[in-house]
Amino acid sequence: MYFSALLSWVLFLTSLIAPALSASSDYGTLGYDYPGLPLAVEVVHQFPPGTWLENLAIRRNGNILTTALSSPELFEVDNRGKDPIKLVHTFANETGCTGITQMGRETFYIIAGNFSLSNFTGVPGSWSVYKVKLHRHLPRSAQVSLVAKFPDSIVLNGITVLSKSKKWLLVSDSAAGVVYRLEAKTGKIAKVLEDPLMKPDSPSGVGVDGIRFDRNILASQFIDYDGTLRAPAKVFATVDGPDDFAFNDVDNVVVVENRADRMGRLSDFGRAYVTLAGAASNDTKAPDGTASELFGPTAVQFGKIKDRIRKSRADWMKAYISTNGGTAQYLTGNVTRGGTISVVDVWGYW
């Protein structure tokens, strides 16, 4: 979502571990200057003007599930861009959707609530988490059920799995700057994370935003099994307007920067940053002349299909990105572009 002050993690911890790093706007930072940048951005599907896509998840067949903040809808997009998009579900009595995560086979958990794109405010207490169980082949109706309402919420945003065995989720409230633990089996909610680094930096700002959790050695130093902090949050890196991030198999981090209209990579425990795609101007080109444009990137996930049959590059080395079409157009009220599902092949840049 728009204007997160820090890339906030619940993976290596909850807000980014020192030392801090300021990201520059060129394609090489701290001496990292790779040939072939920026990378080409391929639009998998273009949505109509006024469609703000907020987040995405990848199905086991490689297709992309994406949530819309401009409408209370969940869509499925063919990752090859060949089949028409499918409307999976419309959430009644809601105006938009934010975070999505998978927990279980073809089972996804989605945040929905009431949010205004005209003034970027949410309706307190209107937010809920839903469970969506998909069938192998859409358009068979998805099974949708309410998991829990959050009466103390302001703007729920990020969601990630804390424990698969216990069916526990972590849910961030960007306006309140807190993280809740949600027990999906019972609907029980508990506030587990609250730290000054997670708070908004202004009354209209956004605090903790995209969140990820992975039970590794470094994470266990900061996050307990129940989602509470073992130690105060620290800054891992400072990035220009980050909105979301994803990890690959070697714990490098790809970050999408909403304000800067670009995607970058953090490595070496936050000490190295390089812009991979988008950014420099509204008509940025890759070295081969293809477009490298990202207008308002909102979330990123790596693909899941490891292609052992075709001799093309594997899907799991592709970063799929949801966009809102450009945040600035919503601030001016002159909305002319729609969001996209786009993909960047990052092969060779890890």
Image (tube, rainbow, N blue to C red):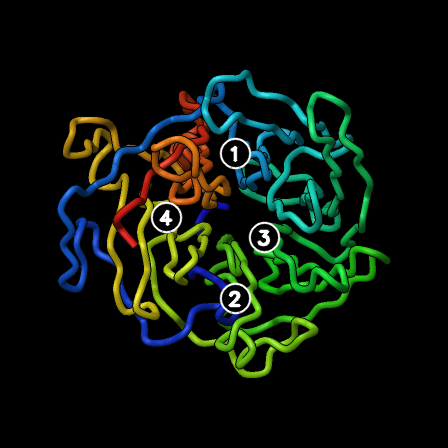
Q: Which residue is mark 2?
A: 11
SS state under label 4: strand
Q: Nearer the viewer, residue 30 or 218?
A: 218
Residue drawn 75% across the image and 22% down it: 140
Which of the two labelled residues, at mark 1 and mark 4, occupies the earlier sequence position?
Answer: 1
Q: Disc 4 vs disc 2: Cβ atoms closer than 8 Å? A: no
Q: Nearer the viewer, mark 2 or mark 3?
A: 2
**Horizontal and vertical percent position of residue 36:** 16, 42
Q: Nearer the viewer, mark 2 or mark 1?
A: 2
As measured in the structure, the alpha-carbon distance from the residue carrying label 1 to the one carrying label 4 is: 15 Å
Q: Which residue is mark 1?
A: 53
Is disc 1 surrounded by few (<14), some (14 to 19) or many (20+) residues within 10 Å? many
As measured in the structure, the alpha-carbon distance from the residue carrying label 2 to the one carrying label 1 is: 24 Å
Which of the two labelled residues, at mark 2 and mark 3, occupies the earlier sequence position?
Answer: 2
Q: Which residue is mark 4?
A: 257
Q: What amino acid type is highlighted by mark number 1?
A: Leu
Q: What amino acid type is highlighted by mark number 2?
A: Leu
